[in-house]
Image (tube, rainbow, N blue to C red):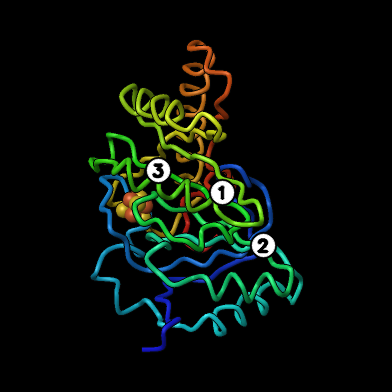
Amino acid sequence: MPRDSIKVSEIFGPTIQGEGALIGQPTVFVRTGGCDYRCAWCDTLHAVESEYRDQWLPMSSTEIFARIEELSGDTPLLVTLSGGNPAIHPLEPLIDLGHEKNYSFALETQGSMPRPWFSKLDVLTLSPKPPSSEIETDWLKLDSCVENGMKGKQKTHIVLKIIVRDKKDYAYARATSDRYPDLPVYLQPLNEQPDNERGKTQDGNNILRERDTVLDRTRWLAEFVIHDRWYKATVLPQLHVLLWGDKKGV
Ligand code: SF4
């Protein structure tokens, strides 16, 4: 297998980024396959579970970038590297290739695999998982991810994005933000879909139900933050779910 072979679950777009610091920005998504976590509420199991492995296509950086250019009509834009955990894969050559042609790169990871090339990213979103995920955070690895992101000549914008389902998650989010006081923090309510609804073709009623759930949870979280006087935090819903429901590939 070539050294820069990357397992790709899907490449899609342009669409808009639906979460975090870059919300609303047009982007092409590259979703890699494979993850070292198994969060209780993972909403991208098709990029995590081994039963989907035969759907992950091994692609070189050149092949991935050619597809990005095709989708974007050769017009430089933001490329979002997501997963699974994209940090598993050797993504540095892809980032270099894209930068040569004025594309920018944002990567989202839980922060369990520090990589020196994080410093080449334009935006590094660290999304450590709260208690409701049933996964323990390895704080030293997360520290190391932040350090790696800060090492480069160019400035990588590093942000925290934390999902909040309940009060315990909220306390985790505050403690995490206190550990990294210089990083902006984005809070996102958990969008919980029952397992048997995931991945189904959606009718209009489903989308409306999801929208209500997202808005109710965002309202709860926003009121909690304001009541707690945590004015540093930014609360955002998943914009793509409000627009299109929990569909794959938008
Ligand atoms: S880290 Fe992300 S992709 Fe991996 S299991 Fe958790 S939610 Fe799913």
Counting other residues with Cα less than 10 Å from the Cα at mark 1, is it few (<14), some (14-19), or many (20 or more)?
A: some
Q: CA distance from mark 3 to mark 1?
A: 30 Å
Percent from the top left, x then y, of residue 53? Answer: 29, 74
- Of the numbered discs 3 and 2, the one sitting upstream in the chain is 2
Sequence-first disc among 3 and 1: 3
* Circles 3, 2 touching at the beta carbon (< 8 Å): no
Local SS, label 1: helix
The residue identified by callout 2 is 104
Callout 2: SS: strand
Name the residue: 49% across, 84% down: 60
Measuring 47% from the left and 17% from the top, which residue is drawn there?
Answer: 224
Residue pictured at 60% horizontal, 78% vertical: 65
Residue 219: percent from left, percent from top:
51, 23
Q: For the C terminus, which image quadrant?
A: bottom right
- Along the horizontal axis of the image, is 110 left or right of 168? right
Residue name at image x 68 percent, y 51 percent: 25
Between residues 230 and 205, which one lies in front from this camera angle? 230
- From the image, tell me which residue sits under label 3: 143
Query: Mark 3 is on which residue type?
Result: Asp
| Local crowd size for mark 2, using a 10 Å CA cut-off: few (<14), some (14–19), many (≥20) | many
SS at circle 3: helix
Q: Position of residue 108 (x, y in %)?
A: 48, 53
**Closer to the camera: disc 2 or disc 1?**
2
Q: Which residue is mark 1?
A: 240
Discs 3/1, front:
3
Dot 1 amino acid type: His
